[in-house]
Amino acid sequence: MLSPEEYAKRKRELEAKRAWKSEQRRNKLVKNVLLIVLGLVLMGVSAYYSYNQGLRNEPINGVNKKPEAEIAEEHENHRTHILFLGTDDKGKFASRTDTIILAALDLNKGEAGLISIPRDTRVYIPERDTWDRINAVHAYGGPKMTMKIVADFLDVNVDYYIETDFAGFSRIIDTLGGIEIDVEKDMSYTDTAQDLYIDIKAGKQILDGKEALDYVRYRDYLGDIALVNPQYDIYGGRVERQRKFVMALIDEVLQPSTILKLPKLISQLWGAVNTDLPWTLALKLAFAAERFTTGNIVTSVIPGTSDKLYGAWYWIPDVEGTKQVVDQIIHGIQPPLTAEVLNGSGVQGAAGLVSELLKENKVDVKRIGNADHFNYLITKISVSSKETADRAVHLAEKIGAELMIDTKRESPVDVTIIIGKDYQIP
């Protein structure tokens, strides 16, 4: 028999458990209602554009449109590729694209990949028989030509596009109630020619529509993008901030509380985007949203470096690196593990020998060096997630290392290997 104290404790635990289950049921109900309403919204918006743009089975700028039934079946078993374009004046061909992001969505698995394409990326434009910055393509032929050039550049299919401008972007952010961002530094910039006045202080804060637009448009000494650490393929600049903002925006949109903002958001979406997305697919996307989480979304940027050609600066893509990014982000193919190998045993050449063994096993070794001391008794492999640990099991077995998961670990590489005194050099 339970004592009065034990009985009271058990009663509190049961009440807490019931309250938790009740809260979970309410959250699920709210989320399901949100998905249904959002689906209807997207269906209406897409049907509107489908009607006005005449989505018939005829070529549009060389892009063949398929019947709705074929589209729905086509996207059951592969990723849907949607090009997101941000311009300074939506709907006008003369405008250039300030933001270009290709998204690959797997509706069945709830996985997504986003590739940011720097606007100064140098590409070949067959229609003009010239090389130019990719952001100029929109001015030459609008979103359809931009879709074609991106498809040629990345060697992938681009199914649809969604386009918005600065004004529409700001309105949507305001309707959502702002976006929480940890601003990494003070941002101050004035450009009277563009009527651009930016003044944002560093720190975690909620940015309204104007501030959010200023944040993604701000350019520091790194410009649009820069390779700040070639050893680890780390990039900085405006494109990186835009990727950070997109992830924060996705996180906000997936919140159940967004349902309270839908009535106003409907009217904002109606006039803020231009798209050729069919309403049938828009509805499928809405109902698949429950499967998506920020943890299942990966992002990257087209790798490369800045260079000056014929008097103008461009972002010159790394061809092989771009192919690897496309395989990972668009096709969902796992890239090779990246690693750093540190000598913690004091045995000269140990890290070098292990790194050669790793390369033979298709591991991309980014750095070789010494650990913080030479008194490690056991060889260790440190990773930050179970998913990476599963991929590194064979490495641990190969070199006889202890595999450890450290969720607080922060490193630009997938695995950190510290060679201990127990390692037997072959």
Image (cartoon, rainbow, N blue to C red):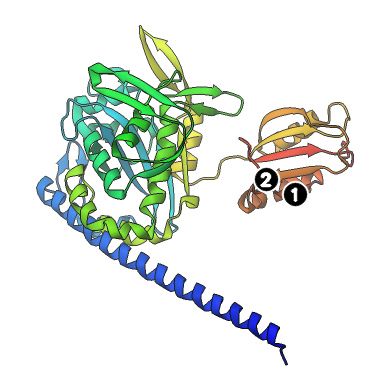
Mark identifier at residue 234 = none
Question: In this view of the protein, which residue sits in the foreground, 296 or 157?
Answer: 296
Q: How many marks?
A: 2
Query: Which of the two discs, 2 and 1, labels the residue nearer the N terminus?
Result: 2
Judge whether 335 appears above or below 122 on screen.
below
- Quarter of the image that includes the C terminus: top right
Dot 2: within a 10 Å radius of its alpha carbon, few (fewer than 14), some, or many (20 or more) residues?
many
Q: Amino acid at mark 2?
A: Val
Q: Name the spot of residue 237 as percent of width and height, x first.
A: 45, 26
Judge whether 79 appears above or below 341 on screen.
below
> In the picture, residue 196 is in which quadrant?
top left
The extreme front residue here reads 4
Q: Amino acid at mark 1?
A: Leu
339 horizontally vs 20: left or right = right
Image point (15%, 31%), residue name: 92
Question: In this view of the protein, which residue sits in the foreground, 185 or 312?
Answer: 185
405 horizontally vs 45: left or right = right
Q: Secondary structure at mark 1?
A: strand
Label 2–label 1 contact, CB within 8 A: yes
Residue tagged by mark 1? 403
Q: Name the spot of residue 22 as percent of width and height, x first.
A: 46, 75
- Quarter of the image that includes the N terminus: bottom right
Q: Secondary structure at mark 2?
A: strand
Dot 1: within a 10 Å radius of its alpha carbon, few (fewer than 14), some, or many (20 or more) residues?
many
Q: Name the spot of residue 104 as percent of width and height, x first.
A: 39, 46
The extreme top residue here reads 311
341 horizontally vs 192: left or right = right
Q: Is residue 207 visible?
A: yes
Residue tagged by mark 2? 383
> In the picture, residue 212 is in which quadrant?
top left
Q: Is residue 163 visible?
A: no
Question: Label 2 vs label 1: CA separation?
Answer: 8 Å
